[in-house]
Amino acid sequence: MKRLFTFALLFVLATGMVWAQNEKYTKAMSDGINALLAIDRSNPDPKSLVEISNRFERIAAAEPKEWLPKYYAAYANVLLGFVAPTLNEKDQYLDKANALLKEAEGIAGKPNDELEILKAYQSQIHLAADPMNRWQTDGEKFQGFLQSAKSINAENPRIYYLEGSSLFFTPEEYGGGKKAAKPMLEKAQQKFSAFKPETAIHPDWGKMETEWMLSQTN
């Protein structure tokens, strides 16, 4: 009886420690995501993005079995690849994003639509940094990653947001433009209205950008 009581007590203590650890992890992630959401999307501050990326990397070091911290660190570096002033700096951030995504894939251990979508976004920004020299290779990668994401979860709205944004910023003479982008952006908006992230700390970005681009098509 005493042994049974001791076992039960140890089980309760261990469960309590795991719960406290999970709560700490969720709080750290939520704080990092809120900092990311507070960034001015029209004029992102590179210094703030670097700090946010470092924050998620520290969480990743403390929680090596969780893929989301590396995902968000990669996302911050993709944004840095967009706002950095020189091509060399852009590529450094985008290369880091790519490395973090590979690490996140290894942790996730199975096909993941959110990781495929962020790989597509990384390819899109990599192309935009030097379009004349990268449109063919990065364009193929972009489409391939989105097709992979669709095969995993075709209901993910970020797939159609990225497809719409690609058309939106492609010149009309190359098959793009606002008119061409509108149907895909409308599809993204429809998917966003039904989308529910797996948890409060899972990816949930792109809706605001979709709505802004749709407003420009009108």
Image (cartoon, rainbow, N blue to C red):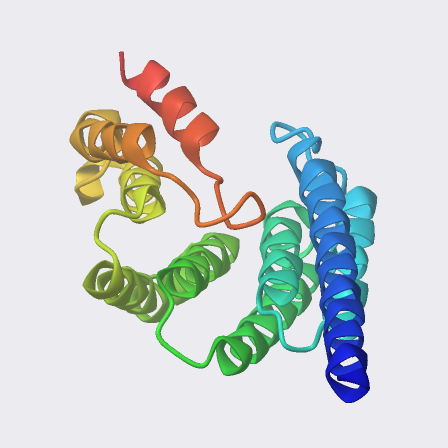
Quarter of the view holding residue 114: bottom left
Q: Is residue 28 above or below residue 123?
A: above
Nearer-the-camera pick, 128 or 206: 206
Image coords of residue 22 (percent x, y): 70, 60
Instruction: Tell me the quarter of the image containing the N terminus.
Output: bottom right
Instruction: Tell me the quarter of the image containing the C terminus.
Output: top left
Q: Is residue 116 left or right of residue 172?
A: right
Residue 120 appearing in the image: yes
Nearer-the-camera pick, 7 or 187: 7
Residue at image coords 22%, 63%: 147
Residue at image coords 49%, 77%: 105
Residue at image coords 20%, 35%: 184
Most distant residue in the front direction: 1
Residue 57 appearing in the image: no
Most distant residue in the bottom direction: 3
Q: Is residue 45 above or below residue 118?
A: above
Q: Is residue 146 left or right of residue 196?
A: left
Image coords of residue 36 (percent x, y): 68, 41
